[in-house]
Image (tube, rainbow, N blue to C red):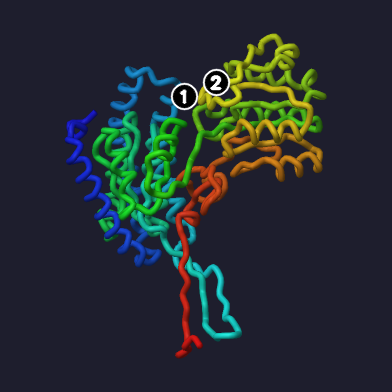
Amino acid sequence: MTALASIESQDIAALMREMGMNARKAALELAQVPAEPKVAALKAAAAKLRENAEAILAANAKDMEAGRAKGLTAALLDRLALDAGRIEGIASGVEAVADLPDPVGRELARWSPEHNGLDIARVSVPLGVIGIIYESRPNVTADASAMCIKSGNAAILRGGSESFHSSRAIFDCMVAGIIEAGLPEHAIQMIPITDRAAVGEMLKLSDYIDVIVPRGGKSLIARITDESRIPLFKHLEGLCHTYVHASADPQKAVDIVVNAKMRRVGICGATETILIDSSVAGRLLPRIAEALVAKGCELRGDETAQAVDGRIKAATSEDWVTEYLDAIVSIKVVSGVEEAVNHINTYGSHHTDAIIAENAAATTTFLNGVDSGIVIVNASTQFADGGEFGMGAEIGISTGKLHARGPVGVEQLTSYKYIVRGQGQTRP
């Protein structure tokens, strides 16, 4: 915790109001900035990230040391850790956002009603000021900053205390880039304290912040939902499922399930529950279990799954609603696609769910029935990522239904207004 974290509560409120006012002013300026300066700012920021890689790694080392002392799990430490390759990935990600088509000023529709002759256009505009509250992944600092700049929005960032030094070092590079390109200095701001009271004050800034994007676990989302006076793009937990249908290709099933669970266990797109059809459980479940155990995964299952493979421990009711973010998976044997869909809609978080099947009718039932932001056929749930969708990056995976759903990319960070042109018409 920094010395700044001891600021009195009344000073925290004043700090947040000042940040809100600065963000609103910057947002009004940014909304009128053409595409080229925004691209230049992001290219410059990517260069700063590469130039300052050693400083970023030194800051990350402080966070990693504190994280180990705090007893963070291996999965959370993996989320937090940076190395030369990940920093290059962050810089490349910023450049990828820079190279996207500009989402601002697009003419979404245009028409002229016969009865009045008006020329009416619907045109994309920035949302305004976006508050992003996230936990231990420092790369979000760059991704969120880049996406907000590209979409003409000002941003107020609040990273987790675990990643404070790493995020600050990345943030400094992003600010240096936008200043070099002549964009408003307060286009992106980061809350400079770790006191949780700052989040509470941030959630009151409805006069300045247009939308809050929370990225984190259940407790963070619950708190923000309860306290916020500002609309939310909810990035709820990733309680993702992979369902192995009776028609699944056996090798695809093994390969996809293992990747979906074990590629990176600490990300929101990791599969947490495997559902497998009863007609193929005896044949496929031991192969899937063998492959998962070989990767160090703990298996928890219902009675039917346990009877098929003795390495599977007994699951409790809590397992069906747990985002492990660890090398643990729950397994349930189901009677068919309808039961799989019902289980997912009952216990899932509406994030990402997949079916492995060769039967077209089964995949159609699954795609139409599962109420999630992303529904996948014959591929890993770990593709739940804006970059993998060709969106350059994402600010989160929205599990709500209003305005944005699924990966929130630069287009989803815009709204629209109507431009109406006349030739002297008056309304009768």
Residue positioned most to the bottom: 424
- The x, y position of residue 422, in whole percent, is 47, 85
Is residue 165 visible in this depiction of the protein?
no
* Residue type pointed to by label 2: Ala
Residue placed under numbered mark 1 in the picture? 75
Is residue 160 visible in this depiction of the protein?
yes
**Left/right of residue 387 with respect to residue 33 in the rendered view:** right
Which corner quadrant holds the N terminus?
Answer: top left
What secondary structure is found at the residue carrying circle 1?
Answer: helix
Question: What residue is at 43 percent from the left and 49 percent from the top?
Answer: 231
What secondary structure is found at the residue carrying circle 2?
Answer: loop
Q: How many marks?
A: 2
- The x, y position of residue 369, in whole percent, is 71, 42
**Is the residue under label 1 in contact with that under label 2 (CB below 8 Å)?**
yes
- The x, y position of residue 202, in whole percent, is 31, 44
Judge whether 425 appears above or below 133 on screen: below
Rendered image quadrant of residue 150:
bottom left
* Residue type pointed to by label 1: Ala
Residue placed under numbered mark 2 in the picture? 327
**Left/right of residue 15 with respect to residue 337 in the rendered view:** left
Rendered image quadrant of residue 349:
top right
**Front position in the image: 185 or 23:** 23
Q: Which of the labelled discs sits on residue 53, or is there none?
A: none
Mark 2 burial class by Cα count in 10 Å: few <14, some 14-19, many 20+? many
Question: What residue is at 73 percent from the left and 23 percent from the top?
Answer: 333
